[in-house]
Image (cartoon, grey):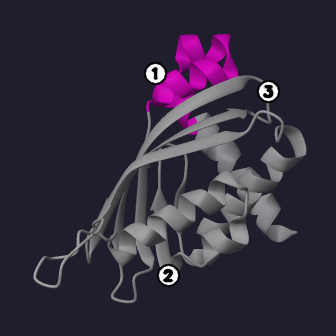
Amino acid sequence: MAYADEPELRAPTMHPNAQTLTKFYTAFAALDPDTMATCYADDAAFDDEVFSLRGKAEVMGMWRMLCEATRAKGRDVWKLEFSAIEADATEGRAHWDAHYRFSATGRMVLNRIDGVFSFNPQGLIQRHRDRFNFWSWSRQALGTPGMLLGWTPLLRNKVRAQAQANLQKFLAK
């Protein structure tokens, strides 16, 4: 019981931009791209080892494509865990682990990813950069070709080109 002259003990409050990241990853875990979209600015940019996207339409096209593919071919094994969310008025970071079946090969993947973010003054994600070990991912997702060539620019560029082609086809629907 707190007395009138004692400060009330409260849990530290999460910065609103940390709440945005929590909302984003909670929605992603639920494969809910509509809620994910509410976290991005219209001029958002996204980069990772495979994609380099500009504008909310492209960024959300990628997330919608990934969510649809997971619902169609891997919902039974999909699991996303996120942690280490930190944010202030302009920047943020998070770690997330994605357990899923890679739709192109049917192979199981555990991808460990670190994201860094910048926010606009309205608290929306303006820049999102995910980093992961491409060779580790390619060994799991692609099997022997990934093990043998996953460290080379040749395979990385082939994966990038195929991913971009898949996204353009998805966006054209």
Q: Is residue 148 magenta?
A: yes
Badge 2: few (under 14), some or many (20 or more) residues near its Cα, within 10 Å? Answer: some
SS at badge 2? strand
Tell me which residue sits at (76%, 51%) in the image. 166
SS at badge 1? loop
Q: Is residue 49 above or below residue 94?
A: above
Q: Is residue 51 above or below residue 74?
A: below
Q: Nearer the viewer, mark 3 or mark 1?
A: 3
Name the residue that disc number 1 marks. 151
Tell me which residue sits at (55%, 52%) in the image. 51
Where residue 8 sits, quadrant-wise, is: bottom left
Name the residue that disc number 3 marks. 105
Q: Is residue 34 magenta?
A: no
Q: Is residue 81 left or right of residue 143?
A: left
Q: Nearer the viewer, mark 3 or mark 2?
A: 2
Where residue 148 sits, quadrant-wise, is: top right
Front one among 147 and 111: 111
Tell me which residue sits at (43%, 62%) in the image. 128
Mark closer to the chain start, 3 or 1: 3
Q: CA distance from mark 3 to mark 1?
A: 19 Å
Furthest residue to the bottom? 122
Please provide the residue range marked out in magenta. 133-157
